[in-house]
Image: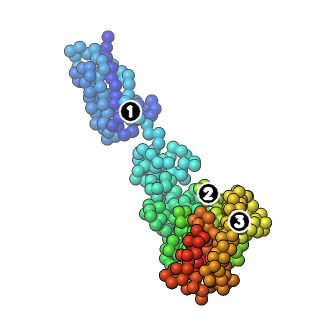
Amino acid sequence: MRPSVLLVLDLREYADPPSDEEGSRRLWAEVEPELIGRDLRPDQTITVRRPGGVIGATVLESDLGAGWTGPDTTFAVCGVLERPKLLYRCGPCADAGQVRYGPFLCSGCGSTDTRRRVCDDHVVILDLSFAKATCPAHVPACECGRTASFWCTGPGCGSGKAWCDQHRRRHPGDELISYCRGCYDRRFPDCSTGGCRSIGTLSCEFQAGAGSCRTRVCPGHAFRWQVYGPARRGLVLCPAHHQRLPSLAADELVRQVISGTLGRRRGRSRVPKLPRLSLFQHIFINVQKRLLTVPQLYDLADQVYRADRSLTALIDEHRPGWQRERTDAITAERDGQHHFARLGQELTAMGHGDMVARISFSIFKPHAGELWVRVPQDLKGRFIGTRGATINALRQRIGLQINLEKL
Ligand SMILES: [Zn+2]
Ligand SMILES: [Zn+2]
Ligand SMILES: [Zn+2]
Ligand SMILES: [Zn+2]
Ligand SMILES: [Zn+2]
Ligand SMILES: [Zn+2]
């Protein structure tokens, strides 16, 4: 029997492993001469250096005994170790005759050949924040023709559009995010006030025509109309609409508050409630320096209700509360008139009957026990008396705090 040797070939360090039988025969022709005339033992590895790389031949079994391999030795290759085949090769590297793993999928190449990938060196990523990779050939072009340098995902560019540096505006708070000019101006509009360089983060909520004014204003140039009391953010007004408040008709002012509130409800989930009628009183005092009674305000809201169909649901929601306020106010008014009549009697009894015809009732606040009266400027001194003697005597006799109305 001819001596035989069982081998495993290691081609992991060999650049161009054979892919067919002919190739294998040629490779073996280079390896076999190196294995002749040797004392081959199991586990021994012979390395063969060739221009294409290093080939290893490891002996699994040998029945040479004490002899050496010779021309009559039979070699059998029972296995070949190869580098795992690269499934995803870098396309640009392959074009240059090199084999390299490509982890990135080019959005251009990917549409025709999903196995054509891009390696770390060849990949082009325009923005770290935006995971869209390409090979150098597929770097998108800006609409002006230049090679793009960033992706914009602003409100006008949707899921992303590539732009060159000529159009780049960086996010004011995050250097890594860029927008095209159009999207930047939409997201970060300038304050509309002439000469102001700040971003118009706020938008005017004054209702003009079909919707709100929406003029962009920076916090410094915006007016917060505190129609929801001091604890909640009031309606934003641009300087022009802030200036118009004092000259608005009473029903229009009420309508502004109601439709501004409706505009807010459309925009967000935290819904503001309409002001109580007593808060409307303060709104009128602050903005127009005039005092309206609660029943007058109720009627104004009702006027708005009948004139603007879009506001009826919102008004109906608040109507029960407003009705209670109105009933209480009417009761207080009646009680107030009663107290005021007594005030006239007491004044007359104190010898000041001539003043009675010139003073008038303003409001009565039952919870505070306050009776507010209007006294002409030239009578104020007499009404109050020396060191408050007259007004204090009146307080004693009626049992109420008496206040002079400023309006
Ligand atoms: Zn590459
Ligand atoms: Zn590509
Ligand atoms: Zn461009
Ligand atoms: Zn854009
Ligand atoms: Zn401004
Ligand atoms: Zn405005």
Alpha carbons under labels 3 and 1: distance apart: 98 Å
Percent x, y for residue 287? 61, 76
- In the rendered image, the vertical position of residue 140 relative to residue 213, given as above or below: above
Mark 2 Cβ inside 8 Å of ligand 6 = no
Tell whether 310 sits left or right of 235: right
Circle number at residue 82: 1
Between 407 and 105, the one lying in front of the other is: 407
Mark 1 is on which residue type?
Glu
Mark 3 is on which residue type?
Ile
What's the coloring here? rainbow
Mark 3 Cβ inside 8 Å of ligand 6 = no
Q: Which mark is nearer the camera, 3 or 1?
A: 3
Tell me the residue at 47%/39% (across/down).
87
Tell whether 72 sits left or right of 366: left
Is residue 374 something that shows in the picture? Answer: no
Tag 1's secondary structure?
loop
Identify residue for label 3.
330
Q: Considering only order in the chain, which callout, 1 or 3, is on the residue closer to the N terminus? A: 1
Alpha carbons under labels 1 and 2: distance apart: 68 Å
Classed neighbour count for the residue bearing mark 3: other residues with Cα under 10 Å, few (<14), some (14–19), many (≥20): some
Between 126 and 10, the one lying in front of the other is: 126
Percent x, y for residue 116? 50, 46
Identify residue for label 2.
271
- In the rendered image, the vertical position of residue 301 relative to residue 85, given as above or below: below
